[in-house]
C-alpha cells in the first residue's frame, strides 16, 4: 500500500529499546477474520494514541508500505 489506512484489532503493545531509542511494537490482527495471523508494526511512541487497550479497534495509517500512526478507530455507527 503506497498511502492509505486500514482497520485492525489491537492485540498487544510492547516497548523495545534499540541503542537507547525507544520504539513500540504494535501487534494487531484483521477485524473481519478472528483466525488471521498476528501482524506487527514498529513505530515511535509519538505515533501511537495513548490509552489503547488490547481488543480496541484501531486505524493504521500507511505510507510507502510502512505504518506511520496508530489511532483508536472512530465509531462510525
Image (spheres, grey):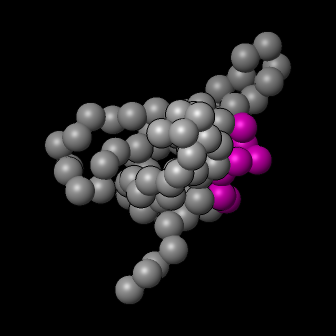
Q: Quick check: 56 left or right of 70?
A: left
Q: Please state the horizontal and vertical placement of residue 50, each as a whole percent of the image.
A: 67, 59
Q: Closest to the observer: 58 or 51?
A: 58
Quadrant containing the C terminus is bottom left
Report the residue that reaches farthest toward the bottom. 77
Q: Please state the horizontal and vertical placement of residue 23, each as a whole percent of the image.
A: 69, 31
Q: Quick check: 59 left or right of 24?
A: left
Tell me what residue is drawn at x 34 percent, y 45 percent. Answer: 29
Report the residue that reaches farthest toward the right. 20
Q: Please state the horizontal and vertical placement of residue 51, each as a whole percent of the image.
A: 62, 61
| Residue 63 is at least partly visible in this image | yes
| Residue 54 is at least partly visible in this image | no
Q: Was residue 27 drawn as part of the magenta stretch in this picture?
A: no
Tell me what residue is drawn at x 54 percent, y 39 percent. Answer: 2
User: How many numbered circles are shown?
Assistant: 0
Vertical placement of 13 versus 70: above or below? above
Q: Please state the horizontal and vertical placement of residue 4, each as a whole percent of the image.
A: 53, 51
Tell me what residue is drawn at x 48 percent, y 59 percent. Answer: 58
Q: Quick check: 11 left or right of 32?
A: right
Tell me what residue is drawn at x 23 percent, y 56 percent. Answer: 32
The part of the chain drawn in magenta is 44-50
Vertical placement of 18 versus 67: above or below? above
Amino acid at each position: 500500500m503506497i498511502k492509505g489506512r486500514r482497520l485492525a484489532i489491537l492485540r498487544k503493545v510492547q516497548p523495545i529499546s534499540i541503542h537507547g531509542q525507544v520504539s513500540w511494537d504494535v501487534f494487531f490482527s484483521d477485524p473481519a477474520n478472528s483466525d488471521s495471523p498476528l501482524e506487527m508494526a514498529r513505530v515511535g511512541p509519538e505515533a501511537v494514541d495513548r490509552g489503547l487497550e488490547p481488543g480496541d479497534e484501531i486505524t493504521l495509517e500507511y505510507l510507502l508500505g510502512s505504518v506511520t500512526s496508530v489511532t483508536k478507530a472512530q465509531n462510525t455507527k
